[in-house]
Each structure stands twice: as C-alpha cells, then as structure tokens.
Amino acid sequence: MSSILTLLVATLARRGGVRAMGQPSLPYSKVALRARFANDDETLWPGETVDVTLTLATFTNVVVVPSSAVQLGLAGPYVLVVRPDLKVERRFVTSGNHSGKDTIIASGIEAGERLIISGQKDIAPGKQIKIQADNGHVLARTP
C-alpha cells in the first residue's frame, strides 16, 4: 500500500506511510491503520492510538451542498431548489461522495442555486416562499 499519511498530534506533525488498513467499523466510519513514521526524538510510542485524517481523493470544480439538503424519495435523491420567482422546485440529483456534513452533487443542480436545507417537510414543490433574515440566518417561509 503506497498511501501517504500525515499524522497530527496536538502540535506534532509527522509524515509517514500506511502499511496496512483494516475494515471500516460502521456507523462511526473508523478504520484501523498501521503506519510507519520517523520517530527520532522518541515522541511517539509504539502501538499509540491517535485520530488521523486520511485524504483519499481531492475533487475540484464540483457542486457541494449540505448533506441535509439532499432528501431521499421513491424515485431517488432530490433537493428543493428555490427558483428566482421564489417558488420551490423538486429537482432529482445524482449524489456523489460525502464527507462529514457535505455531499457532492454530480448532476441535477448548478453552482449558485439556492436550496432548502432544513424543514423540507413543511415546504411543498410549487409553493411560493418568503425569504427573511432571523438572527443572521436566512429563513424560507410560506407566506
């Protein structure tokens, strides 16, 4: 296995190589890795458990939305798009990878479109909404 792993423990940063990787444990998305790092100053202990981030791929020029915007319907995943006339439109999407609270959308929407990210059950497609600010948050409500 030739992956490069960066270990960050508090202010200590080390670069090393992955030697072995176990099966992911669900639902926590944790995986056991065996890696080798230079340890000339003997700061690391053999068998030490640490939290690391392993970047498997980097995507560019993709549409990324909050995962809460993506809903699952009988015909597949969709988002609720706020059109320029402030009417809500259900748009079926092809979702890609997700990381944390974000999901990559492969097709179905364009960058810059406004989406409903919470309270989707209260807003039906085709309905007119009113956008207002409340404590720094943008809210969409039915008039």
Image (spheres, helix red, strand yellow):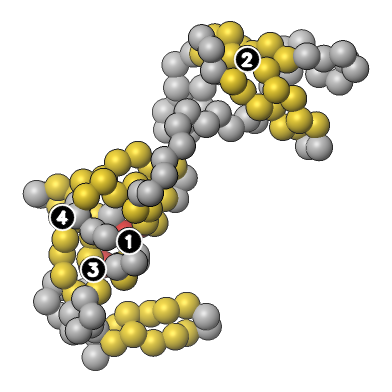
Q: Which residue is mark 4?
A: 92
Circle 3: element type? strand
Q: Are marks 1 and 4 in contact (CB under 8 Å)?
A: no
Q: Nearer the viewer, mark 3 or mark 2?
A: 2
Q: Residue at x 82, y 14 (%)?
A: 39
* Mark found first going from the N terminus, 3 or 2: 2
Q: Nearer the viewer, mark 1 or mark 4?
A: 1
> What mark, if any, has residue 81 been given in the picture?
3
Circle 2: element type? strand
Q: Is residue 56 left or right of residue 37?
A: left
* Mark found first going from the N terminus, 2 or 4: 2
Q: CA distance from mark 3 to mark 4?
A: 10 Å
Residue 12 in sight from this viewpoint: yes
Are there few (<14), some (14-19), or many (20+) residues within 10 Å of tag 1?
A: few
Disc 4 residue type (three-letter): Phe
Are there few (<14), some (14-19), or many (20+) residues within 10 Å of tag 4?
A: some
Q: Residue furthest left?
A: 75
Q: Which residue is mark 2?
A: 17
Disc 3 residue type (three-letter): Val
Q: Are marks 3 and 2 in contact (CB under 8 Å)?
A: no
Q: Are marks 3 and 1 in contact (CB under 8 Å)?
A: no
Q: Is residue 98 left or right of residue 56?
A: left
Q: Which residue is mark 1?
A: 111
Q: CA distance from mark 1 to mark 4?
A: 15 Å
Q: Are marks 2 and 4 in contact (CB under 8 Å)?
A: no
Q: Nearer the viewer, mark 3 or mark 1?
A: 1
Q: Are marks 3 and 4 in contact (CB under 8 Å)?
A: no
Q: CA distance from mark 1 to mark 2?
A: 36 Å
* Mark found first going from the N terminus, 1 or 2: 2
